[in-house]
Amino acid sequence: MAPSDPTATARRRARFAYEVAHASTALRGVALAGGLAVLALGLHRTSQATWIVAGALAVALAALGWRGGAWRRGALAGVIAGLPPLIAPSLVFALSNGGHCAMCEDGASLTCLFTCLGTGSLVGVVVGAHAVADRAPGPFASAAIASAALTGMLACGTTGIGGALGVVVGLMAGGVTGWVVAMRAAHA
């Protein structure tokens, strides 16, 4: 048997380490999505849509984590940006009605819908502004908006199509606004 080529062995080891790092990042994304689903379960009433969104979030975070670079950075930023739309409806409803959204048996209140839209818009502006500063703004913004929308929809999706549209439209409009404002400030 011929002795193994040290260069080929080093390449195989480097490639294996590379793949292990990407796989572990993907698994961390799935674990993060699971934790967010548990948080949503504690804060809001759940439906089949909640579990579909949680599954989509797990797949998205795993894929974006595996991809790496700006995609991974954007996914993490999006999860952080999605926390206000995830948490705020419960806080607003608790402060205004003495209960929490898990008690919304008949559907969302108008207050919860506006909270989804408002928080989605605010975090969208922040995501859009931060995307401009990233080395790869397009992938960063795409990953951030997708993961923020899915994270926010864990809560706002439980309110029905109105809440889901509120967080998605808010994030998209806010993201474009933040992007435009940041671009204008950079060129001024």
Image: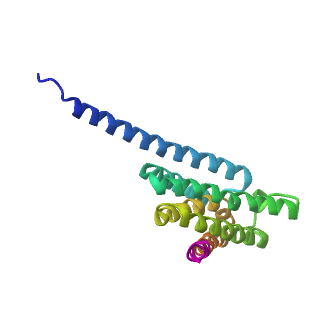
Against 135, residue 20 (above or below) is above
Residue stretch in magenta: 177-188
| Residue 14 belongs to magenta span | no
Prevailing SS of the magenta stretch? helix
Q: Which is nearer the eye, 129 or 160? A: 129
> Which quarter shows the N terminus?
top left
| Residue at (84% x, 58% y) in the render | 99
Name the side, left or right, on which 136 lies relative to 131. left
| Residue at (60% x, 55% y) in the render | 79
Residue 147: x, y in percent? 56, 59
Name the side, left or right, on which 47 lies relative to 135. right
Residue 162: x, y in percent? 66, 73
Based on the displayed image, in which of its 4 quarters is residue 102 positioned? bottom right
| Residue at (64% x, 59% y) in the render | 82
Q: Residue furthest front?
A: 188
> Which quarter shows the C terminus?
bottom right
Against 2, residue 187 (above or below) is below
Based on the displayed image, in which of its 4 quarters is residue 164 positioned? bottom right
Residue 90: x, y in percent? 77, 59
Q: Which is nearer the eye, 30 or 20? A: 20
Name the side, left or right, on which 13 lies relative to 75. left
Residue 57: x, y in percent? 54, 55
Name the side, left or right, on which 23 lies relative to 28. left
| Residue at (44% x, 51% y) in the render | 68
Q: Which is nearer the eye, 73 or 32? A: 73
Against 110, residue 12 (above or below) is above
